[in-house]
Amino acid sequence: MSPVIESDEHKALRAAVAALGKRYGRAYLTALAAEGGHPDELWAEAGKLGYLGVNLPEEHGGGGGGIAELSIVLEELGAAGCPLLMMVVSPAICGTVIARFGTESQKQAWLSGLADGSRTMAFGITEPDAGSNSHRITTTARRDPDSGDWLLTGRKVFVSGVDIADATLIVGRTADARTGSLKPCLFIVPRDAPGFQRRAIDMELSAAEKQFELVLDDVRLPADALVGDEDAGLLQLFAGLNPERIMTAAFAIGMGRFALARAVEYARERTVWKAPIGAHQAIAHPLAQAHIDLELARLMMQKAAALYDAGDDIGAGEAANMAKYAAGEACVKAVDQAVHTLGGNGLTREFGLASLITAARVSRIAPVSREMILNYISHQTLGLPKSY
């Protein structure tokens, strides 16, 4: 499924990661999820081979590439059945934000570890009463006038991997000294910080990475826990959110490719009458459509990654949203058609597709719903008035 416009370097990266993923596969990940474990071996090997930090600066232990390269890594691991969800969070969001806006000491402290996989960082933005409306975020940060420390108070939900992450990049808000209005800021909160509490959310979703609700009760942080400029606000936030959307698209495309490959293999071999079921157009055409949709989604993902890596944040924002939308839709349809192709076998553990029914829905919902993406395109691209 390699696109014809891909460079030789990208083709080689894709092939190498595919080989790594094949050695682990879907059974590895589902077994870990059932046992409550984490894909530590795969994560460590991907880090050692340079795949986790392929987008981070070379001077800090990374590969010097961009989101285009990192999305290839995640897509190919997904196509092998063993995607690493924390790649979306740790090197893509947190690594990108720190590399672009962090202080030199923050870069020294975090980037090499994020690149080789020895350190991980979670990302906390969603709140119980805010949802998709980031302007309603109530987690606030205030200065201690005596020490200069920051004090964070608030709640976050649906934060992935907090139990294994060394720290969480928390989106809080500080008061503008001139206007009194609140503006978004980013803070690195260590996992063991006093007042930083977590509770696992009981999910139907079967995944190695667990979801958590966080409570920050006057969490005291040093002044240098702030990432970037206190006044930069949304610029720094969206520097992380655009890669998140691109990487979510990669996650979804990889998942869809895995499901489609299983269905195609089954349709070639399963014979009920005279010919394999894949000879019947009722089976073949929906699978062909799923392949087309996944390829189209990947092209938009590549466009978004290219725009982001070129420094076009505005263009990347539009493309990243469209890529995430297209990939989510293509993934859900591919998984649904794969299960339908296998019939009863599609619901057995042997074929590894049933658990993807729930997982595929995540690509439509997170990190932003398809409805909010349609809202964005409606008023940002088409110039239609807002309804909210």
Image (cartoon, helix red, strand yellow):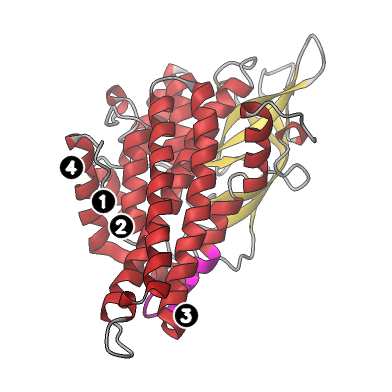
Please say if 177 is above or below 386: above
How far apart, in angstroms, are the residues tagged by discs 2 and 4? 23 Å
**Span of residues in magenta:** 346-358
Q: Is residue 355 covered in magenta?
A: yes
Query: Which three-letter amino acid code belongs to the residue tagged 1?
Result: Glu
How far apart, in angstroms, are the residues tagged by discs 4 and 1? 18 Å
Q: Which residue is mark 1?
A: 45
For the residue pair 198 and 314, the one nearer the viewer reads as 314
| Mark 2, secondary structure of its residue | helix
At horizontal 28% and vertical 27% (from top left) the residue drawn is: 64
Query: Which three-letter amino acid code belongs to the residue tagged 3?
Result: Leu
Q: Is residue 236 covered in magenta?
A: no
- Asked if the residue at tag 1 contacts the one at tag 3, i.e. Cβ–Cβ closer than 8 Å, the answer is no
For the residue pair 105 and 292, the one nearer the viewer reads as 292
Task: Indicate which disc, 4 or 1, sits on the residue closer to the N terminus.
Answer: 4
Residue 121 in the figure: left or right of residue 223 = left
Q: Which mark is residue 41?
A: 2
- Asked if the residue at tag 2 contacts the one at tag 1, i.e. Cβ–Cβ closer than 8 Å, the answer is yes
Task: Indicate which disc, 2 or 3, sits on the residue closer to the N terminus.
Answer: 2
